Image (cartoon, rainbow, N blue to C red):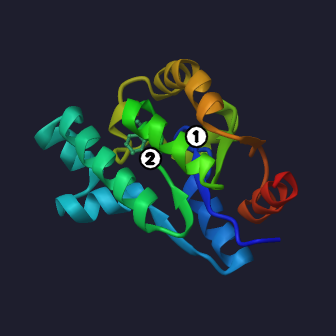
Amino acid sequence: MATPRIVLVGPPGSGKSTVAVALGERWQLKVRDTDADVESEAGKPIAEIFVEDGEPVFRALEHDAVARALDEHDGVLALGGGAVLHDDTQAALTAYRERGGVVVFLDVSLAHAAPRVGFNQSRPLLLGNPRAQWQALMEARRPVYERVASVRVVTDGLRPADVAALIEQEL
Ligand code: S3P
């Protein structure tokens, strides 16, 4: 099998970052995470960007980080859960697939996402009533995740290494 180039999309708690690491280990590929890129570019955690600068500033930083990573990175890339909402990012993912890249939607139920997310301060969009927020967010985004992805894998109850093996089967 030729070395795959993979982008992982999906909601918070679907396991994007841990599955990216598992895929990287499985195929000896470099791993990159756009949440981490945004934090290093801004010099502060995402929660602080939301509080101090607001969501539009975060989304602009995120859009730049995704565009750069899709251009430069040859390996496994985990996107922040809301990155796919940007029209340019959707177009960039279509182009990425046309160049042979694979976009994987990590699907998950609320029951399995909740313990992973922990619903803590690091996810500013989920403060207040986190379960209801997560459900609303997933309902609104599901069609987008399905549209941008070429492969969908349900991660409920699976360890990252098992999800990585499932993704390999789907390629
Ligand atoms: C967000 C998801 C987070 C992070 C930010 C916004 C979202 O990333 O980018 O808090 O809009 O779903 P994870 O999906 O890695 O939690």
First in sequence, mark 2 or 1: give its number: 1
In 3D space, how far apart are the residues under numbered discs 2 and 1 (Cα atoms)? 8 Å
Residue at position x 58%, y 40% in the image: 10
Residue at the limit of the structure toward the bottom, as seen here: 28
Residue closer to the observer: 85 or 159: 85
Kindly tell me whether residue 142 is visible in this rendering: yes
Asked whether, in this view, residue 111 is left or right of residue 68, the answer is: right
Q: Is residue 86 visible?
A: no
Q: Quadrant of residue 126?
A: top left
Question: Measuring 22% from the left and 40% from the top, which residue is drawn there?
Answer: 50
Mark 1 lies on a secondary structure that is loop
Counting from the top left corner in percent of width and height, residue 87 is at 40, 30
Name the spot of residue 1 as percent of width and height, x first.
Answer: 83, 71
Which residue, as the protein is rendered here, is positioned at the far front? Answer: 99
Q: How busy is the neighbourhood of tag 2: few (under 14 within 10 Å), some, or many (20 plus)?
A: many
Q: How far across and down, in percent of the image, does residue 72 sit?
A: 41, 67
Label 1 near ligand 1 (CB < 8 Å): yes
In the displayed structure, does residue 9 sit left or right of residue 92? right
Kindly identify the residue that appears in the image at 65 percent across and 60 percent down: 19
Which image quarter has ligand 1? top left
User: What type is the residue that disc 1 sits on?
Assistant: Gly
Q: Quadrant of residue 115?
A: top right
**Mark 2 close to ligand 1, CB under 8 Å:** yes
Residue furthest to the left:
52
Where residue 80 is drawn, which disc sits there? 2
Residue 109 image offset from top left, x and y in percent: 69, 32
Q: Is residue 56 left or right of residue 6?
A: left
| Marks 2 and 1 close (CB-CB < 8 Å) | no
Residue pictured at 38% horizontal, 36% vertical: 88
Is 23 or 51 nearer to us in this picture?
23
Q: Amino acid at mark 2?
A: Gly
Looking at the rendered structure, which numbered label has been put on residue 10?
Answer: 1
